[in-house]
Amino acid sequence: MKIDDQHSGPYRTPLAGPPMGVFGKLLTIAAGIVVLVVAFMFSIVALGVILVVGVLIFAYLKWKTRNLPRDLRDLHERMQEQAARQGGNRTPPAGGRVIEGEVISDAEYRSSTQSGSTDGNSNGGPRGPAGHSPG
């Protein structure tokens, strides 16, 4: 009988080794356990390294942006002060009307509504400077 005839059969693959005894099976189980323990230890170390790097990156970003809220608050206050100096109090003059952000005095409004048809503007809408229709 040939050696190939011993390993051939319906349940054997060409690469399968000879049947193992009890010692071979115990050795295979021990090797599998060692591989699993090493893989678990590697994953724990990798997770620890990733966690430490993440904490360091977070601490670095927190340190670099520690003054950002104060700077934004100061910038907001400076912008409010600048707006107040430039006339940030945008209330219309007494007796005026606000139409689409433009301030029109009562006299100018009455003259534009009374003479609206004579200027060719029949809708009586607001006028720009010097009584001309905007646009």
Image (cartoon, rainbow, N blue to C red):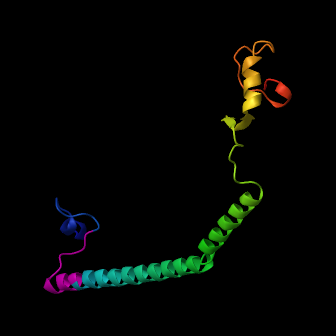
Query: In the image, is residue 7 above or below residue 34?
Result: above
Q: Position of residue 102 (x, y in %)?
A: 72, 36
Residue 12 drawn at (x, y percent):
20, 64
Q: Residue at x 69, y 38 (%)?
A: 95
Asked if residue 124 is among those painted magenta in the image, a careful observer would answer no
In the displayed image of the protein, which residue is found farthest to the left?
Answer: 22
Q: Residue at x 44, y 80 (%)?
A: 51
Residue in the foreground of this view, choosing between 43 and 101:
101
Q: Quadrant of the C terminus?
A: top right
The residue at 52%/77% (across/down) is 58
Task: Indicate left or right for 107 with 12 as reference.
Answer: right
Q: Is residue 129 left or right of residue 10?
A: right
Where's residue 9, x and y in %? Answer: 17, 61
Residue 1 quadrant: bottom left
Foreground of the two, 108 or 75? 108
Range of magenta residues: 16-29
Q: Is residue 17 magenta?
A: yes
Please name whichever residue, 120 or 75, is drawn nearer the observer in this view of the structure.
120
Q: Quadrant of residue 85?
A: bottom right
The residue at the point 17 percent across, 75 percent down is: 19
Looking at the image, is 47 positioned above or below residue 80? below
